[in-house]
Structures are given as structure tokens and as C-alpha cells.
Image: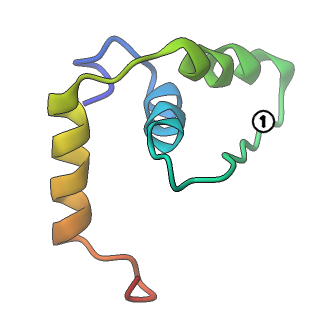
Amino acid sequence: MAKECGLAPVSFAVARTLSKDFVGSTLIGATRVEQMDEFLAAAGATLPPEALAKCDAVGREIRYPMGL
């Protein structure tokens, strides 16, 4: 899905968390300065509704281990 949106996987993942109004903060785990470009690319990314719907569908199929 990330490739379809023209994003690196980590950029897509961070952009998705930023798209959720109930997420109060998004933590990133960069271990090298070079990784920051991909994390920061998420800040300006707008994911299409179709991509968000696909992510939501996967989330319904593969439940969070704690049952939430």
C-alpha cells in the first residue's frame, strides 16, 4: 500500500497514525539521522481514502493481540 501511495513503508505507517484523530501522539524510533527524512515525509503526506480503508480492513481481520 505504501508503494501505491508513493511512500516508504515507514512514512506510510506514520502518516496513517497521524490520520487518526484519536491518536494523541506518534512516536518514532530513528536510530540514524538518515532515517529522519522518511519519518518527516509523513508529516506532509495525505493518504487517499482507499488506502486508509484497506488499512482498516486489515485491522479488522488481524486483531490487536490484547483484544482492543
Q: Is residue 36 above or below residue 53?
A: above
For residue 61, side relative to residue 31 (left or right)? left
Q: Is residue 40 above or below residue 58?
A: above
Q: Quadrant of residue 19?
A: top left
Q: Is residue 28 above or below residue 51?
A: below
* Residue in the picture at 25% in, 38% down: 52
For residue 35, side relative to residue 63 (left or right)? right
Q: Nearer the viewer, residue 34 or 66?
A: 66
Q: Quadrant of residue 53?
A: top left
* Residue in the picture at 60% in, 20% down: 43
Kindly give the residue lying farthest to the front in the view shown.
21
**If the image is split into quadrants, where does the N terminus sit?**
top left
Residue 17 at x, y = what percent?
A: 50, 44
Residue 23 at x, y = what percent?
A: 57, 53
**If the image is split into quadrants, where does the C terminus sit?**
bottom left
> What residue is shown with label 1?
30
Mark 1: secondary structure? loop
* Residue in the picture at 33% in, 26% down: 2
Kindly give the residue lying farthest to the bottom in the view shown.
67
* Residue in the picture at 19% in, 68% down: 60
Colouring scheme applied when the structure was drawn: rainbow
Residue 65 at x, y = what percent?
A: 41, 84
Label total for image: 1
Q: Is residue 21 above or below residue 48?
A: below
Q: Residues within 10 Å of mark 1 (few under 14, many from 20)?
A: few
Q: What's the amino acid at mark 1?
A: Ala
Residue 41 at x, y = what percent?
A: 58, 14
For residue 13, side relative to residue 3 (left or right)? right
